[in-house]
Image (cartoon, coloured by chain):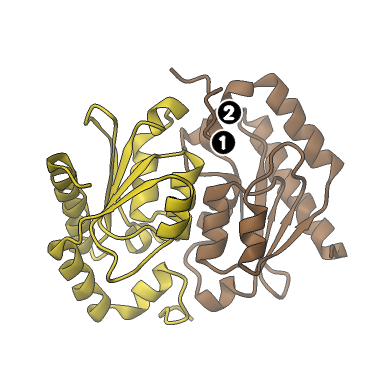
Chain colours: A yellow, B brown
Amino acid sequence: MATDDDKKFMKLAFEEAQKGYDEGGIPIGSVLVDSAGKILGRGHNLRIQNGSPTLHAEIAALENAGRLSATVYRASTLYTTLSPCSMCTGAILLYRIPRVVMGENRTFKGDEELLARNGVAVVNLDDEGCYELMQRFVKERPGDWGEDIGEETSSLP
Amino acid sequence: MATDDDKKFMKLAFEEAQKGYDEGGIPIGSVLVDSAGKILGRGHNLRIQNGSPTLHAEIAALENAGRLSATVYRASTLYTTLSPCSMCTGAILLYRIPRVVMGENRTFKGDEELLARNGVAVVNLDDEGCYELMQRFVKERPGDWGEDIGEETSSLP
């Protein structure tokens, strides 16, 4: 179930995504928030900007949060503008983050079933802004998008 | 099935692990190798050195390899001195790396079943050197080890 806070933090995740787009990157953003509503970390996909195959938005937000105790992770919520891929799903499971709120999963559907099977609460806001920004990007740069999700449509040699 | 090349590349992964230990870090190392036996990337866990919650050895090796096409990933082998956690398992699945060779899984057993269910060939060398180095570390610094795998035994507040 989505709350008013969910909309507020998704707006921040979207701002990260927009920042990524404006930098010429892949427009996916993420925010990690603790149980009191304090932002622990935020970030956006840095594949293009840093030449990074692992800094997906969720990983960037976790990295930006720095080292945290298991207790903090286990009471946090991860916001992401797009359904998390296998790697980001695995990071959520590693740290037992109990709740994931995504902007949309129409552009790409990650391992939501694996999250749910492991007891993670998964909320999809089906946000039109997140969807439109990703759709614009995928149309403009299908090769970079394919690369980001390990597809053969990658524009790399 | 393990090959002579597997032993050779595991030796390099172990060198990375030892380097991590010598730096005061968590002694896990990893090497990504292409189908012709060329090293694409190598790295070790950087939690302590970089204050990084996401640079597990496998992620560090992928990051060090830089941006690669799906075709390259899909013909590569990932060597790691320890059974890959959920996050690293997810990264392997994202890029459809078809083969994972681990040093051991007695200290920690990750998501090997998930890898196997997704068609990844999983080889365990049960290497005594990898096992002994990890055992030494876990005994010396159980808090840092707990933190690395998201356990409550973390020494962080």
Q: Nearer the viewer, residue A98 or B133?
A: A98
Q: Is residue B80 left or right of residue A13?
A: right
Residue marked by disc 2: B146
Name the amino acid, label 1: Ile
Residue B41, visible in the rendered structure:
no
Q: Position of residue B43 (x, y in %)?
A: 61, 49
CA distance separating discs 2 and 1: 6 Å
Residue marked by disc 1: B149
**What residue is at 35 percent from the left and 73 percent from the top?**
A144
Q: Position of residue A39 (x, y in %)?
A: 24, 34
Name the amino acid, label 2: Gly
Q: Position of residue A56 (x, y in %)?
A: 38, 56
- Report how many numbered discs are placed on residues in the image: 2
Secondary structure at numbered mark 2: helix
Q: Position of residue A91 (x, y in %)?
A: 46, 47
Residue B58, visible in the rendered structure:
yes
Secondary structure at numbered mark 1: loop
**What residue is at 48 percent from the left and 45 percent from the top?**
A93
**What residue is at 45 percent from the left and 78 percent from the top?**
A156
**What residue is at 73 percent from the left and 36 percent from the top?**
B107
